[in-house]
């Protein structure tokens, strides 16, 4: 092998190595930011990972909201009408948050099966429901009539 070919081979190998490292680092960074959606049924079944950031959604159970009078801590139950998960959140809830409404929460599931939310999102009008929540409720056969009509449009 002459010197010119050897030099070209080294350049090509260096480029391939550099691209491989860049793709590997990109995939690693993206995997750290992925947060998958789980319904309460999947969480109770143990499909959701512990101590990993995920999204969970469902309906706020009537009469389950408990507010701490000394702080912004709120706990409530979230259901897909098949199973129920306890959610704890510290912060200001959206204005549209209330019992019987659909929500999506981001956070982590702790070892006790309680979802520790860092963000709670509420639906923005009377017919809208986040697609993930609508799909979970549709699977359980408990989707409210108005929401089903809006979802199927």
Image: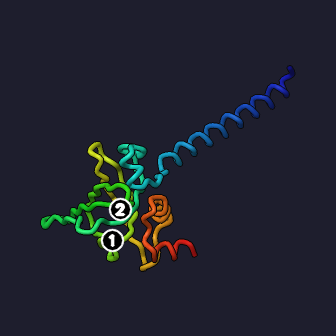
Residue beneath the point at 61% across and 37% down: 21
**Which disc is residue 100 wearing?**
1
At mark 1, the secondary structure is: loop
Q: Give how far across and how far down residue 60 sits, in percent.
A: 32, 66
Which is more toward the observer, 64 or 22? 64
Q: Residue furthest bottom?
A: 126
Q: Give how far across and how far down residue 102 sits, in percent.
A: 39, 68
Q: Quadrant of the N terminus?
A: top right
Residue 137 picture quarter: bottom left
Q: Is residue 145 above or below residue 48?
A: below
At mark 2, the secondary structure is: strand
Q: Residue furthest left?
A: 70
Residue 85 picture quarter: bottom left
The 10 Å Cα crowd at callout 2, few under 14, some 14 to 19, many 20 or more, is: some
Q: Quadrant of the C terminus?
A: bottom right
Label 2 to label 1: alpha-carbon separation: 18 Å
Q: Is residue 112 left or right of residue 135?
A: left
The 10 Å Cα crowd at callout 1, few under 14, some 14 to 19, many 20 or more, is: some
Q: Is residue 16 left or right of residue 71?
A: right
The number of callouts visible is: 2
User: Tag 1 or tag 2, which sits nearer the N-term?
Assistant: 1
Q: Give how far across and how far down residue 130 sits, in percent.
A: 47, 67
Residue beneath the point at 29% across and 65% down: 61
Pointer 2 residue: 119
Q: Is residue 77 above or below residue 94?
A: above
Q: Is residue 13 left or right of residue 59?
A: right
């Amino acid at each position: 092998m002459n010197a010119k070919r050897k030099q070209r081979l080294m350049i090509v190998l260096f480029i391939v190595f550099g691209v491989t490292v860049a793709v590997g680092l990109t995939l690693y960074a993206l995997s750290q930011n992925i947060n998958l959606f789980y319904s309460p049924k999947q969480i109770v079944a143990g499909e959701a990972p512990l101590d990993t950031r995920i999204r969970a959604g469902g309906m706020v159970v009537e009469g389950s909201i408990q507010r701490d009078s000394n702080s912004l801590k709120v706990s409530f139950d979230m259901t897909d009408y098949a199973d129920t998960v306890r959610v704890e959140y510290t912060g200001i809830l959206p204005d549209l948050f209330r019992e019987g409404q659909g929500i999506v929460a981001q956070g982590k599931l702790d070892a006790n099966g309680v979802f520790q939310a860092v963000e709670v999102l509420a639906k923005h009008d009377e017919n809208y429901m986040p697609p993930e929540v609508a799909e979970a409720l549709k699977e359980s056969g408990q989707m409210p009539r108005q929401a089903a009509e809006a979802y199927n449009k």
